[in-house]
Image (spheres, rainbow, N blue to C red):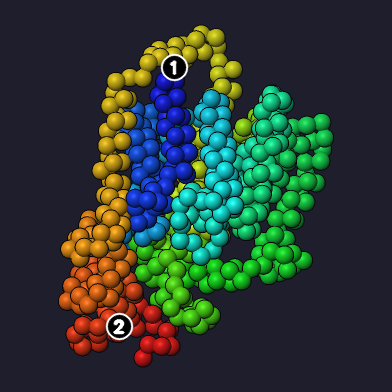
Amino acid sequence: MIKKTEGSAIGLILAFTAGLSTLAIAPWAAYDPVNLPKLLVISLGGFACLVLLLAQGKLLFDRPYRSVSIVATAFIIDLFLVLILAGKSFSQEFYGANGRATGFIAYLALTGLLVAGVFAGSAKNLSRMAYTLIATGFLSVVYGFIQATGADPVGWVNRQNPVIGFLGNPDFQSSFVAFSAVMAFGLLLESKKTLGLKLLIVAYLPIALYVIKESRAQQGFLVFIGGISIILLIFISRSRISILTKPLLGLSFIGATFVIMGSVNRGPLATVLHRESVIYREDYWRAGWKMTTSHPIFGVGLDSYGDWYQRSRTLAATLRRGADITSDSAHNVLLDLSSSGGFPMLIIYLVLIALVIRSAIGVLHRSASFDGVFAGLFAVWAGYQAQSIISLNQLGLAVWGWTLSGLIIGWDIYNANDANSATQSQEKKISRSAKIMKKQALEPASIVAIFVGILVGLVTAVPPLAASINYKSARESGKVQLLIDSAYRTPHNVIRMAEVAVILSENKLQKESVMVLNDAVKEFPDFYGIWSLISQLPGVPIDQVAKAKVQMKRLDPLNPDLK
């Protein structure tokens, strides 16, 4: 078992990483003000945890942790294989697509947070995570309330709804506020909590629900209702009316079935829950599944869905909203993973989910009383999984799903060890305790490991953020050379290069525009938008225009506008 001091350090890293990554934005500094700051925070915390755990050596594969360590190792190996063998744009796969940032770095760091959570599964760390979630949710609610009143100091460019919180999208904002409200509800039902805390929660819940309402995003309410239903089921199963647990579980299953049916325009709730956007999501899901079945081993490449969407969509999807409407995500985390990395990546992820569910069942089986912290965290984890079926993997939400996965597994191991130790002799228990408590200070090797991990995180995650900051500055400067230089700033970004080419063309700098476009297609040959610009912008040689049209037809074969 990991030393208490190391476990406490990991718990602090997890809490700070989850909270700060959700809140991290850089609206006045970076061109991508939402995703890249979050990637940086997650990378710092994730790599710090990874290096610290690697410093523990064989402990990773001790019997209690062996299963999750093997699965996590398999996931990391698969990430490396996909990075090397799939896709054509290394920088895009490594750092993630523009506006997503869910590439190799992100998933490697999230895996580090998950495994770290397994080793930090103690009552103190679970409680710390619960209160961090509520505190972060409170700040999100305050900011969402400011946005709802029209007093947001940030001039976000958002065509949907001003209530986007720190996550850049109303759907994500509503889901995260629902996470915090679900966690608060779990604490509200725990008898050990003080009256003062419960009064604060009672005051917080309606404000949180108001912000969810103002986001006009249905999934926030669905996550909240589903989350409190799980908590109530756990609460009732540990109460004097536990006989009602199975009937209520059956009703919950029926209710969930009606919700799912209603979302796809079936059943009695269809008129309430069905949205036109669901039809579009079905188009994205079909395309993602086609990518998966067409590339079953390694997928199309990490975060490369956008390069393959037009090739994979049906004719109906092409015509439904117009051929120019595209997507860079399947709007389903499972399909995003399977299309990116094939069936192996999907299967490994599903095994991780199964390990969490098994652990949660183990914890609930051993607990005689209601634990509001665990019930709340598990309900939030379930809410994350539910919303991930109809949404993409936004880093500010994903960090909670992956971190809580590890903590739930870790809490099960912690409880199981306590249960087993009760049957051991007093001599063995004393010996075991002595080994755990032998050193109370964080070892120098652990401090160095954390420092090295933070350095690795900085080296890997700062470049895309620095390039984004540089690009925003270059656009605002109005200087041509600075703008051209920003297009070639490492790591290269296809959207940035395309936008620079358009700006140069609009300013009658056709030669420079064509140069940027030609360099872009060399590195991003499967990005339809670049070829489309080559076919349209003035100053492009006729032979290149002809080649561009051939490539456009290759990338969008069902587009009726392409002959």
Q: Position of residue 494 (x, y in %)?
A: 29, 65
- In screen coordinates, is 201 left or right of 135? right
* Circle 2 residue: 536
Residues 224 and 202: in front is 202
* Circle 1 residue: 436
Quadrant position of residue 304: bottom left
Q: Is residue 19 above or below residue 267?
A: above
Label ID, residue 151: none
Residues 483 and 50: in front is 483
Q: Position of residue 347 (x, y in %)?
A: 47, 54
x 21%, y 63%: residue = 479
Q: Is residue 397 visible?
A: yes
Image quarter where the N terminus lies is top left
Give the residue type at disc 2: Gln
Image quarter where the C terminus lies is bottom left
- In screen coordinates, is 518 left or right of 249? left
Q: Please tell me how crowded label 1 is: few (under 14), some (14-19), or many (20+) other residues with Cα within 10 Å.
A: some
x 44%, y 29%: residue = 12
Disc on the earlier residue, 2 or 1: 1
Label 1, secondary structure: give it: helix
Q: Is residue 302 above or below residue 66?
A: below
Give the residue type at disc 1: Ile
Q: Position of residue 186 (x, y in %)?
A: 67, 36
Label 2, secondary structure: give it: helix
Q: Is residue 548 visible?
A: no
Question: How many numbered discs, if any?
Answer: 2
- In screen coordinates, is 50 left or right of 546? right
x 40%, y 51%: residue = 27
Whole-number angstrom distance, CA of label 2 to CA of label 1: 68 Å
x 58%, y 69%: residue = 277
